Amino acid sequence: KLLFPLPSSLLAMTVQTIVLDPALSLIGHAKSQVDKRREKCPQATPRSCCLSRAFFAEVSPLISLAAKRGYLNLGDLWESPITARKSYAELMQLWEKQQESKTPKLWKAMWKMVRGFVLKGIFFQGVATLFQCLNPLFLGALLRILEQRSSGSCADSGSKGMIETALCQEWSGYVIVALLSVSLFISAICQTHTLLYMQQAALKCRGAQISAVFQKMMKLSGVGMAKTGSGLINNLAANDTEALLTNVQLISQVFFAPIIIIVSMILLGLFLGPSFLAGFGAILVIMSSAVLMIGKIFKYKVLQLQSADSRVKLTNEIINGVRVVKSYGWEQAYEAAVMKLRTDETWRLKQQGLLFGVFVVIILTTPIILAVVTFSVYVGMENVLDAPTVFTAIAYLNIIRFPLAFLPFGFQSLLTIKVSMDRLQKLMVAEEMTPT
C-alpha cells in the first residue's frame, strides 16, 4: 500500500491497460507476420511436383524474399524435418537392438538410421556417372562429323556403314550437340541431388552423435568416467562429431570411383588399342603408393587422437585441482607433463602433414603421367594420332582424373569415420550409474 496507494482492482486494470494489452497485441502481430512469411515460403510437401523437387524450385520463394529484403529472419526459414531429438531416439532404438547381438557395432545402427538418404545419394551418383561416361562418346562423334565433312568423305558415294551414313546427315550435328547438352545437364542435376542426400545423412548422424554423447555423459558412473576420461568426451563432442559432416561428400566417390576408372580404361582400350595397358599399369603403381601413404596417415591419425585425449584430460584435471597444485608447488612438474603431450601430438601432426603432402603431389601428377605414358606407347606402336582419337582419349583421361584424386581421399574419410565410430562406441558401452 505504501508503494501502490491505489486500490487493487484499479491497479490491476491499469497494469492490464498499460502493459499486458500492448504486449499481447505485439505478440499477436509478430505471430501473424511469421504466418504470412511462412505462407509466402511454404514448406515442401509430398504433393509437390516432381519437376519442382528435381530442380529445387521450392526454394525460389525463399530466395526471392531474401533478394527483396536483403536478409532473412528465423521465422522465414522452414522447420527442419531432421531434428537431433528424433535422430537420437531412433539411434537409441537401433542401438538397443544391436546390443542384443554377440558383437554389437554402433556403425551398423548408424547405417540403418541413414541408409535411406545414403542409398538415394548413391543412386543419383550412379546416374551421374553413367552420363559422365557417355559425354566423351558424344564428343568423339561430333569430332568425327567435323573430320568427315572437312575431308569431303561424306560426298563419296562408296560403301559406308550405318554409323558413317548417319553421321553424314545434315541433322546429325544438331542431334549430337543436343544429346551432349542434355547429358551434361542431367549429370549436374544428379550430382547436386547426391550432395543434398549425403548432407542430410551427415546432419542426422551429427545430431544423434552429439545428443548421445551428452546423454551418456550424464549417466556415467565413476568407473565409466575413469575408463573414458573427460578428454575423450570433449573431443567426441567437438571434433569427432564433425568428422562425418566434413567427409561425407567423398563417401559416394568410394563406391563409383573404381567403376569409373574401369569403364574409362575399357573405352580407352577401344579407342587406343593395347597401348592403354601402359596407362593401366601406371595407375596400379600409383594407387599402390597411395594406399601405403593412406595407411601411414591413418596410423599417425590414431596416435594423434590418443595424445589429444590425454592432453585434454590432464589439462582438465589441473584446472579442477589448481589449488592443490599451487599449494604443493607442482606447477613445473605438470607443465612438463603437458608440454610432453603437446610435443608428441605436434610431432604426429607434422608427420601426418608431411605424408599427406607427398600423397597430394602423387595424386595431382597422376593424370599427367597417365597421359604421357599412354600416348607415348600409342605413338611408339606406329599409330597415327587424329583429332577424334586424341580428344576422346583426353576426355576419358579427364574423367579418370577426378576419381583418381578423390578415391584415396574417400578411403581416408572412411578411415576417419571408422575411428570416430570406434571412439563413440567406447563411450556408449561404458559403465553407467545404477538407478536408485
Image (tube, grey):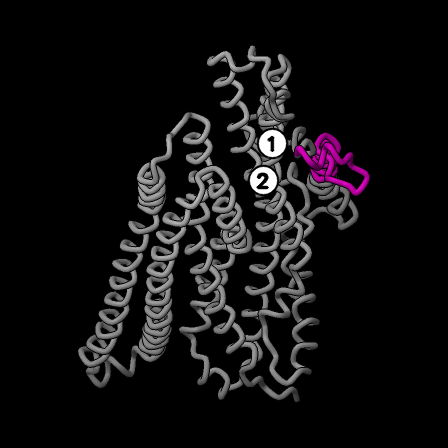
Q: Nearer the viewer, residue 357 or 225?
A: 357
Q: Nearer the viewer, mark 1 or mark 2?
A: 1
Q: Which residues are magenta?
A: 26-55
Residue 123 seen in the figure = yes
**Which image quadrant for residue 352?**
bottom left
Circle 1 residue: 183
Say which quadrant the N terminus sits in: bottom right
The x and y percentages for residue 79 are 68, 46
Identify the residue at horizontal 41%, vertical 31% (top origin): 390
Residue 431 is tagged as none
Amino acid type at image mark 2: Thr
Residue 249 seen in the figure = no
Which of the marked residues, 1 or 2, is nearer the chain's N terminus?
1
So how many labels did they put on this image? 2
User: Considering the numbered disc 2 on the image, is that residue within a helix, a strand or a loop?
Assistant: helix
Q: Nearer the viewer, residue 74 or 261?
A: 261
Q: Is residue 166 above or below residue 260?
A: above
Q: Is residue 76 above or below residue 167?
A: below
The x and y percentages for residue 112 are 67, 65
Residue 192 is tagged as 2
